Image (cartoon, rainbow, N blue to C red):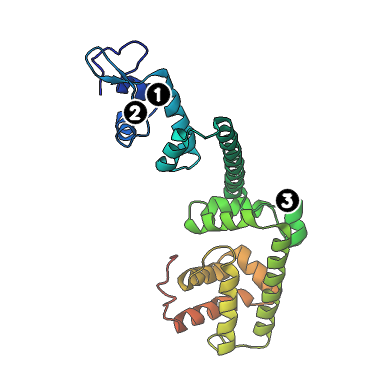
């Protein structure tokens, strides 16, 4: 809307008032219609204009609206002849400070998430080695990020990792070590893939993977292929007991098949 009519002395037309305070003309028309802020002056041709007092009232409305008060409540406060303006301003300031504190906390959380998306965990290199063992290489997190960083699962992993404390990582690592010891013992004992006990171990392994991201049966099959086919993974599992990498893959495959997933066609989804 363009104001063609010049204002009267000391007044602003609706378009100029809207531009000055940073709201739309439609908003000022609405506030006029509900009696929240009514222009109190007139142009020479009879158009209504906003006085300095009206503009000051608009600014007060904007502050109250920013802290979440409904328009009806704002109008009641502004029109209450017994209202203590200084007390309302003091209360407004306190609420704005609280909101600023919450926003600063949110910024800190976002910064932590941005860091997690790069590093994959909120641990120093020294803490990683202490928690995960001497065999752990801190660079593995960066390599994993390069390999899977664009995936939804990496985003889940980064988000969860950013929220975990060193103590929580220690608990997860202890659970992983216990699981790997049980897997190695089951392999040495000749447990058959597809047996009830082997399927239980497979589900326990999938649940452990789900600590990092939501691991479906189909994704678990893809991981099983990687454990047996990737030289690094195979060396790790076979270091626990010979043949464990291939046996774990077969256990995962059998459990998936028992739950309706064909290992031959399973995809990462």
- Secondary structure under tag 1 reads helix
Identify the residue position indicated by label 1 in the image: 54
Q: Position of residue 88 (x, y in %)?
A: 55, 35
Tell me what residue is drawn at x 47 percent, y 37 percent.
77
Image quarter for residue 185? bottom right
Q: Quadrant of the C terminus?
A: bottom left
Residue 172 at x, y = what percent? Answer: 68, 67
Residue nearest the viewer, comparing 186 with 124? 124
- Distance between the Cα atoms at labels 3 and 2? 63 Å
- Does 216 appear above or below 26? below
Element marked by disc 3? helix
Q: Which mark is residue 125?
A: 3
Tell whether 206 sits left or right of 123. Answer: left
Upstream in sequence: badge 2 or badge 1 = 2
Instruction: For the N terminus, give its image quadrant.
Output: top left
- Give residue 38's mark: 2
Q: Can you tell which mark lies on residue 117?
A: none
Element carrying mark 2: loop
Front position in the image: 197 or 165: 165
* Tags 2 and 1 touching, CB below 8 Å: yes
Q: Position of residue 188 (x, y in %)?
A: 68, 84
Q: CA distance from mark 2 to mark 1?
A: 7 Å
Looking at marks 1 and 3 on the same chain, the residue that comes earlier in the sequence is marked by 1
- The single residue placed furthest to the front in the displayed view is 82
x%, y% of residue 87? 59, 34
**Sequence-first disc among 3 and 2:** 2
Query: With 171 as the anchor, is 228 left or right in this view?
Result: left
């Amino acid at each position: 809307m363009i104001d063609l009519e010049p204002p009267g002395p000391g007044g602003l037309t609706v378009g100029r008032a809207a531009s000055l305070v940073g709201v739309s003309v439609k908003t000022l028309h609405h506030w006029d219609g509900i009696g929240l802020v009514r222009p109190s002056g007139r142009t020479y041709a009879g158009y209504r204009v906003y006085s300095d007092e009206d503009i000051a009232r608009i600014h007060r409305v904007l502050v109250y609206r920013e802290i979440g008060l409904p328009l009806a409540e704002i109008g009641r406060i502004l029109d209450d002849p017994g209202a203590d303006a200084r007390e309302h301003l003091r209360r407004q300031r306190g609420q704005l400070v609280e909101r600023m504190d919450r926003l600063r906390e949110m910024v800190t959380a976002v910064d932590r998430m941005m860091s997690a998306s790069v590093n994959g965990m909120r641990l120093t290199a020294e803490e990683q080695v202490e928690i995960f063992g001497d065999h752990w290489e801190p660079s593995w997190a960066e390599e994993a990020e390069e390999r899977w960083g664009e995936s939804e699962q990496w985003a889940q992993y980064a988000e969860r990792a950013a929220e975990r404390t060193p103590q929580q990582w220690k608990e997860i690592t202890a659970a992983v070590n216990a699981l790997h010891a049980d897997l190695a013992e089951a392999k040495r004992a000749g447990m058959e893939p597809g047996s009830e006990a082997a399927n239980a171990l497979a589900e326990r392994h999938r649940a452990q993977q789900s600590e990092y991201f939501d691991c479906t049966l189909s994704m678990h099959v893809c991981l099983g292929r990687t454990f047996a086919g990737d030289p690094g993974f195979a060396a790790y599992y076979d270091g626990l007991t010979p043949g464990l990498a291939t046996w774990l893959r077969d256990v995962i495959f059998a459990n998936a098949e028992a739950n309706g997933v064909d290992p031959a066609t399973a995809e990462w989804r």
